[in-house]
Image (tube, rainbow, N blue to C red):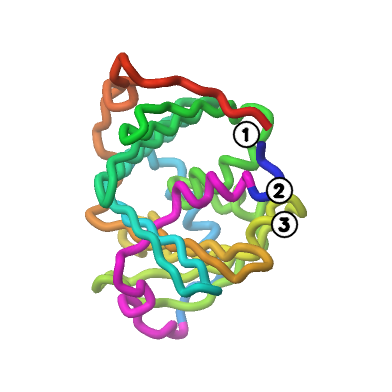
Amino acid sequence: MYRSGKLWIFFALLVVAAATPVHSRASKAQASKWTTDSILDQLDSESKTFRSLTADIERTKVTVVVNDKSTEAGQILVRKDDKMRIDFTKPDPRTILRIGNDLYLYNPKIKQIEQYDLSKRRALVDQFLLLGFGTSGNALKKSFLPSLLGEETIDNRKTLKLELTPKSDDVRNEVSKIEIWIDEATWLPDQQEFFETGSGDYLIIHYTNVVRNANISDNSFKQKWPKDVAHVKPQG
């Protein structure tokens, strides 16, 4: 399920940007007083107090060879106890729900829920589903080779831009590198960009209206599906 491009499906579901080019939002990278090591140390400290977040999310998949962009927008909820929900509302409604080892993709347009078991590749999937959401510096170092690219301003917020090169051969077969912009006020991601290996295609995530440690009830992660939907478990 996770090989030969299928791992990329999960990245594509969770990476986001606005309809206008995201690069126009960011100033040029500036020299920073921070170092890679000092950022990782700060992330270690911040991860100890992270419990949850809510944010607006936009997602664009860019196919370079045909200069095509597809964009979705909605809201994301994340809790540190392996719960996450994304409700896309534009252009079409769609829900992604993660509860522990189970991932549900609900498409109301075709009245179908796909359920995936993450347990066999849990550690690998977590690298991406939770990237930047309370991730510690030590966890980043285990999975990636991090490098500080400098400071940038996005939406009038100061951010630290890191480049992450995956250590795993399996991951590098899908993603050549990741760039992440960390808000210096919240220590949560303002933006993420994933570069697909070989094709040059990429995905961008952009987060706005981020609230750290919001009170999110268990009810937000309940499976409230209509009774007439088809429930499938794709194989492979």
Identified by mark 1, the residue type is Arg
Q: Does 106 sit above or below residue 62?
A: above
Label 2 crowd (10 A; few <14 / some 14-19 / many >=20): few
Q: Report whether residue 211 is seen.
A: no
Whichever of labels 1 and 2 marks the residue nearer the N terminus, that label is: 2
Identified by mark 2, the residue type is Ser
Q: Does 93 sit above or below residue 236?
A: below
Q: Residue furthest front?
A: 110
* Spatial separation of the CA atoms under disc 3 and disc 1: 18 Å
Given contact means CB atoms under 8 Å apart, are the residues at marks 3 and 1 in contact?
no
What secondary structure is marked by label 3?
loop
Q: Residue furthest right?
A: 169
Where is residue 234? Give x, y as percent. Answer: 58, 28
Q: Residue at x 40, y 36 (%)?
A: 96
Of circles 3 and 1, the one toward us is 3
Query: Magenta part of the protein: which range?
Result: 6-31
Q: Residue at x 36, y 64 (%)?
A: 184
User: Depth check: 180 or 2 in front?
Assistant: 2
What secondary structure is marked by label 1?
helix
Quadrant of the rendered image containing residue 141: bottom right
Q: Which residue is denoted by mark 2 in the rendering?
A: 4
Q: Which residue is denoted by mark 1 in the rendering?
A: 122
What secondary structure is marked by label 2?
loop
Where is residue 31? Give x, y as percent. Answer: 46, 84
Given contact means CB atoms under 8 Å apart, are the residues at marks 3 and 2 in contact?
no
* Spatial separation of the CA atoms under disc 1 and disc 2: 17 Å
